[in-house]
Image: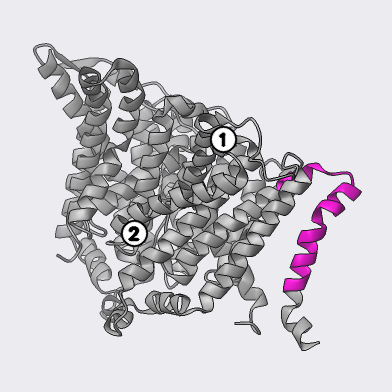
Amino acid sequence: MTWILFLEQCLNGLQFGLMLFLLVAGLTLIFGIMDVINLAHGSLYMIGAYLVATLTQATGSFLVAVPLGLAATAVIGMIIEVLVLRGLYKRDHLSQVLATFALILIANETTRAIWGLQALTLNVPEALSGSVQLLPGLHYSAFRLAIIAVGLMVAAVLYFVVVRTRIGMLVRAGASNRQMATAMGTNIKWLFTAVFGAGAALCALAGAMLSPLLVVQVGMGESILILAFVTVVIGGIGSMRGAFIGALLVGIVDTFGRAFIPPLLRTILPPALADAAGPSLAAISIYLLMVVVLFWKPQGLFPAGG
Amino acid sequence: MAWLKRHGWLVAACLVGLALPKLFTMIGQEFYISVASRVLIWALLATSLNLLVGTGGMVSMGHAAFFGFGAYVVGIVALDAPQWSAAPVVLPLAMAATGLLAFAIGSVCLRTRGVYFIMITLAFAQMLFYIFISLKGYGGDDGLQLAKRSPLGALKMADDTVFYYFVLAILAVCLVVLARLRDSRFGRVLRGIKDNEARMESLGYATFRFKLTAFVIAGTLAGLAGALMANQNGFVSPNMLHWDISGTVLVMVILGGLGSLWGGLAGAVVFMVLEEVLTAFTPHWQIILGLILLGVVFFAPKGIAGLFAGKTR
């Protein structure tokens, strides 16, 4: 029984970590390549979730809604890049913080104006609503398995695109030396716009896949944004590999913390104290992880360029 | 005359600050006196962060930790040791406790720099946030209600006007101290570190110690602001440690003007007044606030204080 529980939590951690990776992949590309701190990254995740939820209700099909929502969010992302972020590349990080904070305010309030205060809920698509028997005694939600599959697929595609294709080469060139890449004839301006659009689409994908599991509401972007930044920092800024491993690490530590710390405390502490401290300690676990990582490796686990 | 020309803004600000409660009473809006106190407390918090971010170049996203901790010192003293709850005891106590906390957190965080520093300060603040949620003895999620404001001699602290002047006096003292500090050797070294840390180090300055000192001073003042806010609201809750607060106060500092003595005050006043005015116009005021902030980024890169600078540096 405990084995089953352990495996189940491993899968949950993997699933959460992979979704986090979708967010972090975009964030670390933008961070690493354009050197922009984009606080509004979480807003794109929120916009994507809202669009997919609405489109699912309108078209009646999750499968149709996801690509449409992704494309729409990518377009919104590119518009934001052209209108706002382009003016910020040469500015210091603090101006970027202020500007993208302003974008958060605008995005949240616009969302509230369009969709109202009521949170949206989305049902798991019919075909994936059941559970799959993975091992004797281990039943796991088919939808969560689908999330894991999508996450792994996207990670593989991203790896292929960044490492093996011409576009990926340009992206890497832009990241390691912007001026040199420009001098070699790369149109960095539009490359950045494209990367930003791709990052937005990845956000929307995470939002879409998670929306049947969570409630879609204003503010969902900020809570995950913090986790995403924590992950970027643990992995090492600008490193794709770091983002992937960091995301899995954060996903598993967070899931395990929530699942196992409270019962563990109850065995060693008086119940009243354990009940109070358990959830907090679980919530703290990823921050502790970050502090420990930064204490030993101040540049994160996989410093870019290393 | 030249003196008045140079310090015109300062004189005007002092006069407005002193006359504000009278003005609000005259137009029958006494409610705004407590709003004004709150703005001044935010100004103190923003000013303390500005020492760190603007003067020292250390961008902290965890300043709410010290703000909330200072507030909790007042709340916990009121609950467990009411004999110490007089303002001359509890406020220095809050400052000392927060200073110690800042020393501990700063010693770890200052090993990193740049974005890593931003994130590690955030991590510590979030940890404190969750720790205070778990302290069920002090209200947990719900926070602590305070029975009354910390007494100070014969002053009627419960009166909003009296409390306003108390806060104003504290803010004024802090601004004077910080003004002296900025022009002292310490302040100059700190600015040198912001511009080029390696250079300061090779000039023989122990930069880590200077940075840690600045971190502790900023934390102590943030703790004072928190203690005042606990008094103002009669309420302490874990939300005072939430990263929302750290983000908002950072935005105030950038809005007001990084590294300028008046930046924190200007940013807090403009931000809070905008919020107050815009909410009256439309429920979707955040869109307008967002657009204004974007405007500041693109058209006033040095913040509000930068618009008035020119002459005074």
Examine the rendered structure and indicate whether residue A8 appears above or below residue A110. above
Residue B280: x and y in percent read: 76, 44
List the residue tagged with mark 2.
B117
Task: Classify residue A193 as left or right of residue A9.
Answer: right
Q: Mark 2 lies on which chain?
A: B
Q: Which of pointers 1 and 2 indicates the residue nearer the eye? A: 1
Residue A217: x and y in percent read: 49, 33
Q: Earlier in the sequence, mark 1 or mark 2?
A: 1
Which quarter of the figure is the N terminus of chain B placed in?
Answer: bottom right
**What range of the chain is rendered magenta?**
B10-36
* Residue A162 figure quarter: bottom left
For badge 2, the amino acid type reads Phe
Q: Main secondary structure of the magenta part?
A: helix
List the residue tagged with mark 1.
B83
Secondary structure beneath dot 1 equals helix
Examine the rendered structure and indicate whether residue A262 appears above or below residue B181. above
**Depth check: B193 or B268 in front?**
B193
